[in-house]
Every structure is written in structure tokens, then in C-alpha cells.
Image (cartoon, helix red, strand yellow):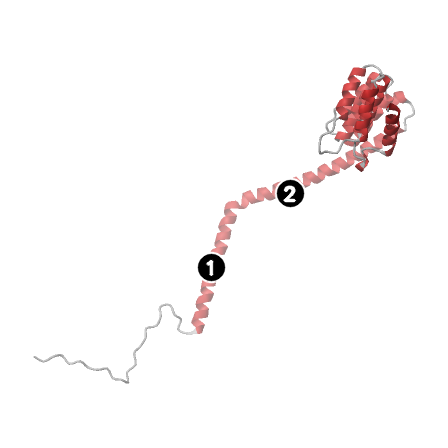
Amino acid sequence: MNKPRHTRPNGKAKATLPTPLGAAANPAQADQAAAFFREVDEAMRVEKMQTLWRQWRWPLAGVVLAAMVGAAAWQGYGAWQAHADKTTAARWNELMRLQNATDLAKALPEFLQSSRYGYHALGQLAQAAAAPMPAGQLAAYQALAADTAQPDWLRAFGQLNAAVVLLGTNPAETQAQLELLAKTELGTPPLPTVPLALELLALHALNKGDKATAKAYTQKLLELPQQGGTLTPALRSRALQRLGGLQ
């Protein structure tokens, strides 16, 4: 039985390699393909942006409009406040030209209704000064002390003056108010009214003949920090003189 005959390949023949799938035939075709894919990608981005805009254009327009209206309203409010402050300042200057205390006392309630912040506090102090009776002074100072729109030191100043007014009519209430004003919190700088309250407490104790209590308040006054203007040189000098007389 004859076996099949194997033929040997000719040594001169060359094997043909397959071309990789997707490979460009030449560089020009590769550039064209890259440009095509870039155009497709750009078109997809534009279409996506258009879809997002169609979906969110009204909410975005609402946000922009609200921001514009808010900015305009804030500017209008600032202009209105500036005009109101200018009007209040002019009105205050007119009140300070009044020579008659009675006319000033009549005009101040209307001024207090239309003023705010610093001018309102000035009006309350002027009302206290123009009041003919201690009851009117006390009411004006107590109104200042209860005004939460004012800073703490100014409210304490009103409370201190109210305590001074009460000194001649209600010494017990004066004592309670001054002790409240003399309190200081640990770690916080005392208000400017604290040394004045301690000095008044010491003087009030001396008037009652209680030298021990007067000495204790005076020593507490001298323990206040001198930095920041809390204990002024005049207050310190008076306290030292008083303490020397109490030894």
C-alpha cells in the first residue's frame, strides 16, 4: 500500500501574515478615522448639553432671576436705610437746638418711635435728662436697660443710672441692682460699668456706716484689670484713698 507523499514547501516561498483587524491601510486613512471619531464625540456632547438645557432651563432661569431680584432688593434696602439714618440725624440735630426742656420732652417720644440703634439710645438718655420727675428718669433708663438692640455695655449703663435714681427712694433695690452690675464672669473682661458699680456699693456701705463692707467692695474694685480701660486711673486713685481711710 502506497503511503501518501508529503511535499515539502519551496524554500523560496514566503508566508503571508494576516492584516490586524481595524488597522488602517495608510496614515491618511488613520487621520480620517480619528477625525470622524472626534466629530462623533463632539456631536454627542452637544446633544447631551442640549438635552440638559431643555430639561433644566426653567429651574436655572428661576435661580438666576431670584438672585437678581435679591441683589436689587438688598441694594434698595441699603439705600432706604441710608436715607432713614440721614433723616434721623437731621431730626436729632433739630431736637438738640430746642432750648425749652418742655418742648424737648414732648418731641422725644415721636423721635424714639422712628429712630433705632445709636440714635434711639441717645433719645432715651435725652428723655431721662429732660424728665422733670425721678419717675420719668427711671422709666427712660429702664427702657434703655431693657433694649436688646443695644450693646451690653450701653444696657448696663442704663441699668446703672436707674440704680442711681432709685438710691433716694428705694435703697434695697439700688443695692440689688448694683450687686448685679458688679458681677463678673471668669475669663471674660468686665464691662466698663463694673468698677462704677463697685464704687457706688462702697459709698453706699459707707453712708450706712458699714466700713467692713465698704472695704471689701473697694478691694474688689482694685483687683480689676487695669488693661483695656476697665479700671481708669481716676477710679483707682479714689479707691486707694478710700482704702487708706478704712484701714
Q: Are marks 1 and 2 in contact (CB under 8 Å)?
A: no
* Residue, far left: 1
- Amino acid type, residue under disc 1 in the picture: Asp
Q: Secondary structure at mark 1?
A: helix
Residue 152 in view in this figure: yes
**Residue 54 in the image, given as x and y percentages of width and height:** 51, 47
Q: Secondary structure at mark 2?
A: helix
* Residue, far front: 247
Tell me how far mark 1 sits from mark 2, CA to CA: 36 Å
* Residue, far top: 169
**Residue under label 2:** 68
Q: Is residue 186 left or right of residue 219?
A: left
**Residue 55 in the image, given as x and y percentages of width and height:** 50, 46
**Residue 181 in the image, given as x and y percentages of width and height:** 76, 25
* Residue, far right: 99
Q: Is residue 9 left or right of residue 48?
A: left
- Amino acid type, residue under disc 2 in the picture: Met
